[in-house]
Image: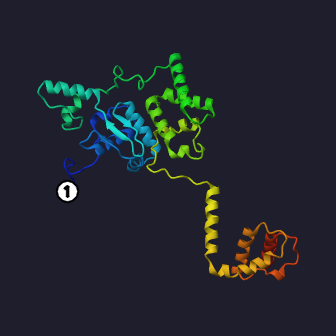
Amino acid sequence: MEKDTFRPRGNISGPILPRYALTLKISLGAKMLYSLLCDYAGDKDHCWPSQTTLAGLLGCSVSSIKTYLRELAGQRLIAVELRECRSSTYYLLKPSFLSARAGQSNSDGGEANSGYITNYRKKETNYPPTPTPPTAKEPPSTRQPRRGVGDFFSANNAFESIWNAYPRKEAKELARAVWHRLWRQGAIRIEALMKSLRRFCRSDGWNREHGRYVPQLVNWLRGQRWLDELPSSPAAVATDHDAKVRAWEAAQERRQADPDLEAVRPQFEAFLARFRDTRLRGPAWGLWTLLHKAGRAPQAHDVADASASPLDFLRQWRCAAHA
């Protein structure tokens, strides 16, 4: 019986995972994300898919995408450039061992290694070991700090700088504890964090209602919110009070535009004139119109006690009508 087979080369398309990425000590999700970014970049050295799109393609959460991006940045495979009002841009960095092999191949007159599988048996035995990120030429701001007393003071001084720049001054010591934990994990890059903080301080969400919606620093750090992308057109979140006011105004406009209600307004005015206290005219008119539509609105001759409030009288009248 013949098997229905096919040759993958030339018959499939999509993300390709470089062989050198398989040897890195990162999670499987980070490796899959790296292949996806390579596919998006194509013949360019950068791409800008949104984190939501990447999460949908990999079948994971946006929080997992952020974790995978940190792993790739820690291995010096990508560089993330945060952009305001659009998705972040991801630059694909050439690993140091690829640059060394390319120089050696060119000097020998051979062809440079692209990092993808072209001859499996040939590359299987002489593939280089796992690359280690260079530290000699790395900027001091992105270099992983050493653990110890000096590292503690460096982390503490960096936290004080962030605290002074953060607009909301609450729960400082809780924020300090979260900061030191993230610092020990190597999840903090000072320059990127400060750049993101400046973007958030200029955003409409943080400047609305005198900074009412600015989260505490401990929550901002714990959720690693500096990696979030600001929406292109931030929508103002209306408070419950504003929503109620708009709903009441809309209801008033509908009532005023109803000719049937305007025709019976003299009946309501005659009913209201029977009471001494007429301060709650608006609510009384609303309840009276509801009773009128149901055919049970009281008239002026139905009022026996003028000392009561018209709104209380209408409520009792409605209860008696339902009974």
Q: What percent of the width, then of the height, locates residue 160?
A: 55, 26
Q: Give the residue displayed 50% in from the left and 26% down from the top.
A: 184
Q: Amino acid at mark 1?
A: Glu
Q: Nearer the viewer, residue 220 or 114?
A: 220
Q: Left or right? Give the position of 308 relative to 44.
A: right
State the quadrant of the N terminus: bottom left
Q: Is residue 22 left or right of residue 306?
A: left
Residue 293, relative to residue 180: is it above or below? Answer: below
Does the rendering let one see residue 323? no
Q: How many marks?
A: 1
Q: Which residue is mark 1?
A: 2
Residue 259 percent across, percent down from the top left: 63, 80
Label 1 crowd (10 A; few <14 / some 14-19 / many >=20)? few
Q: Residue at x 72, y 83 (%)?
A: 295
Q: Nearer the viewer, residue 129 or 194?
A: 194
Who's the residue at 54% across and 38% down the image? 220
Residue at the outermost left position? 109
> Foreground: 290 or 139?
290
Left or right: residue 319 compared with residue 107: right
* 264 relative to 177 in the view: left or right: right
Query: Would residue 304 be seen by someone viewing this image from the given angle?
Result: yes
Horizontal and vertical percent for residue 45?
27, 38
Report the residue that reaches farthest toward the top. 149
Q: In the image, is residue 247 above or below residue 197?
A: below
Which coloring applies here?
rainbow
Disc 1 is placed on an element classified as loop
* Percent x, y of residue 82: 40, 39
Quarter residue 125 falls in: top left
